[in-house]
Image (cartoon, rainbow, N blue to C red):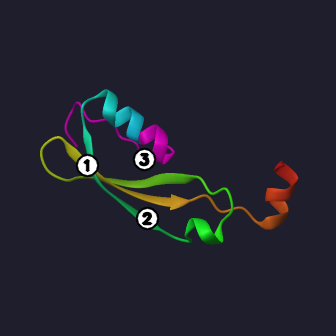
């Protein structure tokens, strides 16, 4: 990564995009792994990998937060 590009690994996708936008870095692609939103109600996506994708851009790989149905019910 270049010096001006923040490492967004571990952040939610929305926060990662915000951090990158603030520093003028674009997101060339978002690769999603794991279950789709259809299979995970209220899923939050977290960046698990960030790679350079050319000058001033990165590619983000994101995975959904997984919580068991019991844990989800307890948090509501």
Q: Residue furthest top?
A: 22
**Quarter in which the N terminus is drawn:** top left
Q: Is residue 71 above or below residue 35?
A: above
Is 54 one of the magenta-colored residues?
no
Which tag is nearer the camera, tag 1 or tag 3? 1
**Among numbered discs 1 and 2, the one appearing first in the sequence:** 2
Q: Which of marks 1 and 3 is nearer the N terminus?
A: 3
Residue identifier under label 1? 58
**Residue 3, horizontal then vertical, whole percent:** 21, 32
Q: Main secondary structure of the magenta part?
A: loop
Q: In the displayed image of the protein, which residue is found farthest to the front? A: 38
Mark 2 is surrounded, within 10 Å at the Cα level, by few (under 14), some (14 to 19) or many (20 or more) other residues, namely some
Q: How many numbered discs sit on the rendered protein?
A: 3
Q: Which of marks 3 and 2 is in front?
A: 2
Q: Is mark 1 on a helix, strand or loop?
A: strand
Magenta residue span: 1-16
**Which residue is at 62% across, 57% downward?**
43
Mark 2 lies on a secondary structure that is strand
Circle 3 Cα neighbour tier, 10 Å, few/some/many (<14 / 14–19 / ≥20): some
User: In percent of the image, x 28 and y 28: which residue is there?
Assistant: 23
Mark with earlier residue (3, 2): 3
The residue under the point 64% across, 72% down is 39
Please name the residue shown 21% across and 45% down the image: 57
Q: Residue 32 carries which label?
A: 2
Residue 30: name its quadrant: bottom left
Q: How far apart are marks 1 and 3 (CA)?
A: 12 Å
The residue singled out by tag 3 in the image is 9
Cα–Cα span, label 1 and label 2: 14 Å
- Residue 18 lies, in percent from the top left, at 40, 34
């Amino acid at each position: 990564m270049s010096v001006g590009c923040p490492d967004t690994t571990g952040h939610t996708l929305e926060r990662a995009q915000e951090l990158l936008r603030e520093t003028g870095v674009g997101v060339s692609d978002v690769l999603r792994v794991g279950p789709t939103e259809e299979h995970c109600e209220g899923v939050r996506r977290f960046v698990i990998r960030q790679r350079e994708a050319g000058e001033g851009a990165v590619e983000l790989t994101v995975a959904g937060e997984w919580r068991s149905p019991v844990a989800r019910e307890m948090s509501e």
